[in-house]
Image (cartoon, coloured by chain):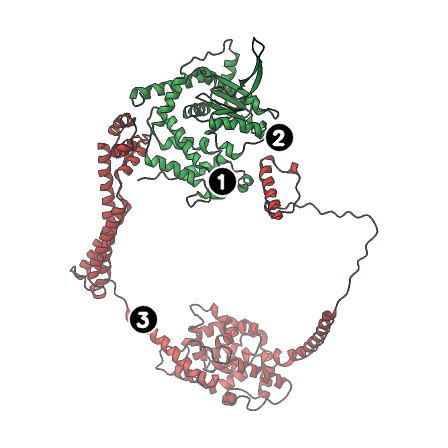
Amino acid sequence: MVASEQFLQTVTDQMKLVRDEIGKVIVGHDDVVEGVIIALVAGGHVLLEGVPGLGKTTLLRTLGSAMHLDDSRIQFTPDLMPADIVGSMVLEADSLGSKELRFQPGPIFAHLVLADEINRATPRTQSALLEAMQERTVTTGTTTHQLEDPFLVMATQNPLEMEGTYPLPEAQLDRFLLKLVVRYPTKQEMEEIVDRTMAPQSPVVHQVMDREQVLDARRGAHEVLIAPHVRDFAIRLILSTQPEREEAHASAKKYIRYGSSPRGAQALIQAGRVRSLMRGRLNVSLADLRELALPALRHRIILNFDAHAEGKTADQVLNGIIESLPEGTR
Amino acid sequence: MKAVERAHTRAVTQVTFREIALAGTIALLGPLLVAVFGTDWLPVGLIVVFAAAGLMAGSYRWSRRRPSHYGVAQHIDSAWETDDQISTAYYFALHPSEAGPLVRVQREQAAPLAASGDLALALPLVIPRSGYAFATMLLLLLVLLGIRYGTQSSFSLQPPLIPIEAPALYADAGHELRREDSTEVRSHGEEPSQSLRKENKLEKSPNTAEPDPVPDVIEGETPIGDALGEGSSALPEVEGLSIDDEFGDELVGGSGEGGEEQEDSESRDPSQQSGESNPDAEAGSTGQGAENETSNDLLSRLEDAFRNMLSSLSMDPPSGSDPGDSSEQQSGQPSPAEGAKSGQKTAAEAPDSGQSGTDAESASGAAPEAPQELTQGDSGSESSAASPEGSNVSSAGSKDGSKELSAAEQMQAMGELSELFQQRAEDMSGEVLIETEAVPQQLRTPYSPTAAGHRDPGGRVSRDEIPYAYRRYVQKYFETLRQKSRN
């Protein structure tokens, strides 16, 4: 089934339909919508950074509705405990009066989980979530519970109010496939948002994909071809972000303290495969990698003091590296 | 895949043409050089050498720059903006073992793209830069051959196209050799004035085509060029004259009659030397005697100053101060009494002398053209009669001596004082007590913006002062410092 043109056409059409359904509710943010879909199909998680009120929760709910997936939302606060996320053992009495402990699943047992303002929770709670993200299992007592695929955590963090927060460690940031920056909508988008919300009827989102089809698309994405020169470009891009390397870019040596890990190359190629599939291609192109380099790598590099002092952002440094990286021929 | 093959053929052809043009450019260098310099100067084998070099360079570059099929596929992908579909399909067609189940579908996707692409867009025919260079070289060679045919009525490559006047080079070399000989003669145990005089005699001989330029440095003496510094300050205004050659000529030929006048004029202060001259000196300098060189000697100038000083004091000059100059004194130098008289006599003419500086300059500039048969004896009486006012009122002889004496006494006194201070300073030790008022003092350091590196320890910074984005780094940094201090 996978190796057919029909399969390719089906997946491409379904993803287009999902985007169209999300577009009924979410105005603009095409790159964010596409990034979330890519992360879902690729089997990763996504970190959204943006101010409140830009439709992150709405996006998740719409995606769940379009794909008929369970969704849940966790508002992270400093007093949130790990049990509040993964669930806890509760004492339950049956009709005969006997009591027994029963596991009450937490909100993490869903296909789509919105971890809102994840940096407000304590590191202990964050690690509980991140362990579930990585292992896709939850252990309570002596029992390990498997999380059902597809499992997507869409964590958000507010870049403005950083007081009293616990920024995610780099090791945990590395577990997010993509980091998407949600920006303010444009004037035209704002006008459309206002018109839609003032309309008497809210738009209805239809289900255009189901869980099995999402998993099929994920399997198909693994089969997407990647030519050696494209793969080589991804590797050279990762190496050029590592300042201690001989292949490091000049700006990487100047501004980056720690470069991207190999997980960055994996994320780049995996996300590139889904992106090419969404565009009806069965091969990863250099354009795919260039487009996805920022979301896939911006949270995997750690800038040094000089970059902070000069006001350089990870995006600026990465853009400089990407633009100057030769495509290379064999 | 046929599109890739066609593109590869096209790309290889272009590279081949480019490298052939480069090889031809290198190969044409040989014939070009031979066409310019001729086979009399360059061997004919040079043509073969350059041809071989061009062939080797072209072959090497062609083998290195010849594109692969996969590279061409990537190139046309980039040119046609086909998202690497053609190159991916081509690669997996050649390596089916690495292909997945989707390779057939992917190839079917890429096939129409490759078939519809325009090769001229991906690989346009461009004349390489080496082609332009080759054409230029070829044109140049043809022009040179045309010139040869026009001048020789044949294509013979034997004579050089550009004749070079070698005798001119040899003439310059002979001139240099003669200068070295004169310097060598001077440096072997002769008195400077004697050697200079000998040179002058040599230079004054009619067979000498070109007089000796400024004599070189004499051992143990002030270089004549330096001694001429004052007297030559008027020379730069003379057109077309350089200090090395023309001024030397002037010295040789222009001081015959006015040699003594020059001695007198040089005993004056530098401003008078540079800008002023006696009106009679104009005629004297046009006479041009050989004694001008000796007058430039620092020793003779000092001697003259000393003589003036003695004349002002009505004392007899020391007899036989310099055996080398004794004859000169007898012949050209007036007696002290005469010098004093001449000094008084010429004092009235002094105001006019300053206005005639330009005339003197022009006269000295015309010195090489002046007749050189004038002797030193001829110039003696004229120069004594025309000596300027500076001869008996020389600063070195009358006034500065007394000043130096008083200054020397002052300097001696200051030296003693400084010595005294030095002795006290060596033994100085003790404590210093500074008394201040018993009022509450506020010792404040005025605010000044300073830039400190983040590695500078020791500064206590408030947590609230650190931007949040940097707190983590600052905290890590101080934790590292604490760990190091514990270790």
Q: Is residue A16 visible?
A: no
How far from the left and from the top, in percent, is residue A4?
29, 22
Q: Are marks 1 and 2 in contact (CB under 8 Å)?
A: no
Q: Amino acid at mark 2?
A: Glu
Q: Amino acid at mark 1?
A: Tyr
Chain identity of mark 1: A
Q: What is the number of the mark on residue B169?
A: 3
How far from the left and from the top, in percent, is residue A324?
41, 40
Q: Are marks 2 and 3 in contact (CB under 8 Å)?
A: no
User: First in sequence: mark 1 or mark 2?
Assistant: 2
| Label 3: few (<14), some (14–19) or many (≥20) C-alpha neighbours in 10 Å | few
Pointer 1 and pointer 3 on the same chain: no
**Of the pair A26 and A167, the residue shown nearer to us:** A167
Q: Label 1, label 2: how many angstroms apart (C-alpha)?
A: 25 Å
Tag 2 residue: A163
Q: Amino acid at mark 3?
A: Leu
User: In this view, which residue lies farthest toward the left?
Assistant: B154
Q: What is the number of the mark on residue A258?
A: 1
The chain displayed green equals A
Query: Regarding mark 3 in the picture, which secondary structure is present there?
Result: helix
Mark closer to the observer (1, 3): 1
